[in-house]
Image (cartoon, coloured by chain):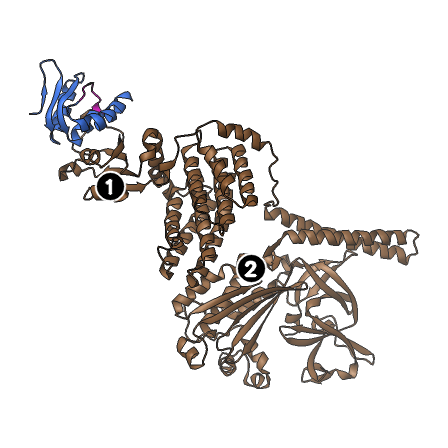
Chain colours: A brown, B blue
């Protein structure tokens, strides 16, 4: 794909997002003038972009939507839900086109087919510069080939057009050899320019047979004759200038920026980068002067045929161009950098180990080595931070997809909904942001489908008819917290208990002893689904357990809090970055293991007698709470369970709200490691989440506490 | 008959030429490809006739009698002849 098309796709996607977001707001507050302007500008710039890459079909589609919005801005019509739907449908089509462009590297062929349709107008205007000032309407008439039999005389009809200014007749297909030429078949395309209005022309063409395209040329009427610019660029520039004249104080900045961008792109597409720089300069001046005049003047200069523009060109373009503040870098390059930094950390840890050895042996340079190592450690930590910072994305890229989802569900299920999104500028690692959509979608669908009551129930409970879904994201230390809450009915604990029992998720006995909180948590258990009727929207055979699995896979946690009759909140706690994991090393039977620090609550030392047997299992009582304890060495099959007189060291862990104790021989140190998932033969080994290299080259197995304590 | 061969050896279009006469004109031109078409007495010509002129590009003797033909159709034919 050429660079220009790449840029077009990236920019268009951003505009589609902007427009979608705005449209969804407008649906609820159709008179939000600022939002309307912003959406209009997005459509306008989209159209400009499509024009530059000569994507006629997209240009026309977006133009149609722009017309609707333009009518709304002028107060001629109100944006109804149906109209917003039409605009969104237009954006959907644009997204499909963009996907196709991205995949194939070129414009869809259906767009290419219609491309010729749009050039006739520009060509016709260009060929007849002397009448340009008077043209009001243009038309292209392709009579039906059999129209002569129907008594149609196309040429007579067109020459009789009121206020005809110019006429062009061309063969539709190349003329065949004369002996096979059929004089009764019409093979013509008639193009005409007239000073008559669209209405007059339409009336005149009434009853024709064939295809007829009629266009109004209001903007072009004032256009001065051809300058050195290609027709396409000139059309775009003319349009920008027309738009600028509608700018008001309130929307000025947006209009200027949008017009400047479209004009600049148009010029760059014609390889007029220098001229584009003038436009960029003029845009700047317009913005700083808070007036559209500088930009309008610059565009007018370019459109005028006098050489004034050229002199201006050399004068202004000698100023330095503003340098770009952002770079677009291939994600793979960043990943390579992250990997290298990881290796560097491992090398640094090894160096630390050497320094320690030197110190133990009383080596003279041990102190120096230690000093250097500390510096190295700090620098590498900084490096790592900035490298990981490069992979960081705002959650907006995921969350902005939800207004559409919620809108559609709201319409489909007949439940009026508002969606509030907070903290969408919260950042997280790219890998996390990208995997979040599916789990979040599942939760949101569940909340709407099962959580939010029907209108009748809401009324009975005295709740407002419009239900509220809120997605709130925030950074807490090295964690990213995302909360999805609704004001629906909350979780019906009795029903959960009943279903868990009938589906065999938990036994009667377990359920009886379980605190309410744990019962609610059962909705995340495998094999559980509360959907009484399976709707199209949620309950597609994948339970909430899939959500928990997906989130835990990247080192996050999911919890659910329910307020009976008052709604529920699902909380995702996610690591900020997936790359570094904090572990604590523990020793069992002479072997070292890592325990993820986020699973550790505390470490305690208890007399061995405090570990009491409960059936086949063991437990301790810690602050009035029974905590099951397992002997790490024993469950890993390293040796029999220990017994003795000394105190036992126990690591208290908490996974998904379940407390457990790991009985270990010794506690080691805290390490920040890069966890590598198990691969090859080790894949799927139970109880181990991954491995990392220790400073001395030994492999540290990092335990999967959740699995071990099950 | 509004299409006929004149004593001077030109094909003459006279008065109002209807759509049927496209075929007549074409036959004349096929038979004698180098004949000029004299449309000085032509008051109107159906698209079918004009289309034959566009496809065959004979030499034209003008201007035609009708103003509309002179103003709009003659330039179109002239542009075709130039090609």
The residue under label 1 is A201
Q: Quadrant of residue A316?
A: top right
Q: Position of residue A131 (x, y in %)?
A: 31, 31
In the image shown, does A303 or A337 lie closer to the viewer?
A: A303
Horizontal side of B11 relative to A326 (left or right) equals: left
Horizontal side of A377 relative to A540 (left or right) equals: right
Q: Secondary structure at mark 2?
A: helix
Horizontal side of A116 relative to A185 (left or right) equals: right
At a point 52% along the width and 48% down the height, the residue shown is: A253
Say which chain tag 2 marks: A
The residue under label 2 is A435
At a point 42% along the width and 81% down the height, the residue shown is: A460
Q: Which class describes the residues within 10 Å of circle 1: few (<14), some (14-19), or many (20+)?
A: many
At a point 75% along the width and 52% down the height, the residue shown is: A380
The vertical placement of B14 against A429, above or below, is above
Residue furthest to the top in view is B8
Q: Is residue A479 magenta?
A: no
State the CA–CA distance, disc 1 to disc 2: 56 Å
Q: Is residue B60 magenta?
A: yes
Q: Secondary structure at mark 1?
A: helix
Residue B70 in view of the camera = yes
User: Do badges 1 and 2 share one subunit?
Assistant: yes
Q: Quadrant of residue A31?
A: bottom left
Tell me the magenta residue range: B55-63
Which badge, 1 or 2, comes first in the chain's sequence? 1
Please identify, in this view, whether the residue under mark 1 or under mark 2 is nearer the observer: 1
Residue A171 in view of the camera = no
Q: Position of residue A346 (x, y in %)?
A: 74, 54
In the image shown, does A397 or A692 lie closer to the viewer?
A: A397
Say which chain tag 1 marks: A
Q: Position of residue A336 (x, y in %)?
A: 65, 48
């Amino acid at each position: 794909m050429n660079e220009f098309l790449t840029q077009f796709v990236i920019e268009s996607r951003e505009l589609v997002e902007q427009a979608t977001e705005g449209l969804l707001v407008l649906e609820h507050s159709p008179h939000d003038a600022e939002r309307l302007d912003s959406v209009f500008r997005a459509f306008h710039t989209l159209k400009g972009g499509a024009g530059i890459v000569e994507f006629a079909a997209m240009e026309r589609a977006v133009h149609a939507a722009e017309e609707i919005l333009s009518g709304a801005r002028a107060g001629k019509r109100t944006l109804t839900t149906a109209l917003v739907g039409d605009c969104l449908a237009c954006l959907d089509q644009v997204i499909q086109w963009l996907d196709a462009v991205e995949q194939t590297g070129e414009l869809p062929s259906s767009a290419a087919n219609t491309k010729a349709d749009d050039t006739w107008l520009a060509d016709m205007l260009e060929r007849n510069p002397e009448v340009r000032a008077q043209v009001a309407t243009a038309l292209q008439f392709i009579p039906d080939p059999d129209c002569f039999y129907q008594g149609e005389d196309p040429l007579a009809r067109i020459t009789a057009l009121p206020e005809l200014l110019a006429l062009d007749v061309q063969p539709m297909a190349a003329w065949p050899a004369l002996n096979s030429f059929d004089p009764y078949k019409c093979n013509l395309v008639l193009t005409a320019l007239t000073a008559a209005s669209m209405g007059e022309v339409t009336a005149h063409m009434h009853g024709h047979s064939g295809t007829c395209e009629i266009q109004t040329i209001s903007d072009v009427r004032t256009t001065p004759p051809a300058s050195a610019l290609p027709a396409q660029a000139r059309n775009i520039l003319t349009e920008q200038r027309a738009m600028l004249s509608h700018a008001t104080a309130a929307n000025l900045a947006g209009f200027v920026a949008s017009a400047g961008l479209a004009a600049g792109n148009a010029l760059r597409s014609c390889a007029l980068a220098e001229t584009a720089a003038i436009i960029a300069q003029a845009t700047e001046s317009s913005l700083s002067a808070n007036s559209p005049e500088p930009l309008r003047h610059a565009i007018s200069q370019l459109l005028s045929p006098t050489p004034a523009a050229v002199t201006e060109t050399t004068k202004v373009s000698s100023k330095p161009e503003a340098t770009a503040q952002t770079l677009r870098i291939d994600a793979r390059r960043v990943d390579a950098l992250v990997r290298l930094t990881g290796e560097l950390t491992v090398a640094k840890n090894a160096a630390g180990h050497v320094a320690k050895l030197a110190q133990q042996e009383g080596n003279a340079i041990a102190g120096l080595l230690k000093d250097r190592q500390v510096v190295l450690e700090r620098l590498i930590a900084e490096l790592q931070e900035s490298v990981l910072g490069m992979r960081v994305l705002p959650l907006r890229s995921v969350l902005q997809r939800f207004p559409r989802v919620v809108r559609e569900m709201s319409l489909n299920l007949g439940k009026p909904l508002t969606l509030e999104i907070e903290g969408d500028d919260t950042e997280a690692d790219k890998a996390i942001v990208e995997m979040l959509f599916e789990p979040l979608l599942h939760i949101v669908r569940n909340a709407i489908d099962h959580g939010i009551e029907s209108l009748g129930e809401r009324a009975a409970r005295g709740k407002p008819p419009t239900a509220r879904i809120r997605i709130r994201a925030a950074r807490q230390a090295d964690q990213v917290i995302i909360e999805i809450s609704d004001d629906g009915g909350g979780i019906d604990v009795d029903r959960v208990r009943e279903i868990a029992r009938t589906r065999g998720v938990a036994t009667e006995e377990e359920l009886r002893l379980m605190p309410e909180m744990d019962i609610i948590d059962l909705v995340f258990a495998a094999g559980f689904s509360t959907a009484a009727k399976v709707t199209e929207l949620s309950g597609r055979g994948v339970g909430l357990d899939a959500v928990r699995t997906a989130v835990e896979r990247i080192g996050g946690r999911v919890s659910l809090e329910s307020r009976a009759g008052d709604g529920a909140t699902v909380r995702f706690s996610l690591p900020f970055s997936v790359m570094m994991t904090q572990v604590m090393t523990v020793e069992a039977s002479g072997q070292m293991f890592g325990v993820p620090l986020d699973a550790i609550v505390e470490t305690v030392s208890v007399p061995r007698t405090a570990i009491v047997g409960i059936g086949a299992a063991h437990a301790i009582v810690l602050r009035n709470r029974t905590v099951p304890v397992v002997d790490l060495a024993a469950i890993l099959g390293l040796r029999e369970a220990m017994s003795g007189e000394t105190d036992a060291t126990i690591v208290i862990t908490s996974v998904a709200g379940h407390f457990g104790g790991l009985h270990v021989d010794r506690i080691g140190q805290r390490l920040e490691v890069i966890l590598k998932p198990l691969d090859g033969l080790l894949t799927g080994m139970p109880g181990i989440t991954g491995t990392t290299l220790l400073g001395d080259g030994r492999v540290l197995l990092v335990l999967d506490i959740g699995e071990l304590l099950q | 008959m509004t299409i006929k061969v004149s004593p001077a050896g030109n094909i003459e279009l006279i008065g109002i030429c209807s759509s049927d006469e496209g075929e007549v004109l074409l036959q004349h031109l096929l038979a004698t490809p180098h004949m000029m078409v004299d449309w000085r007495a032509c008051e109107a010509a159906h698209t079918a006739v004009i289309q034959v002129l566009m496809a065959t590009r004979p030499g034209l003797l003008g201007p035609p009698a009708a103003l509309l033909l002179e103003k709009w159709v003659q330039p179109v034919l002239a542009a075709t002849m130039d090609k």
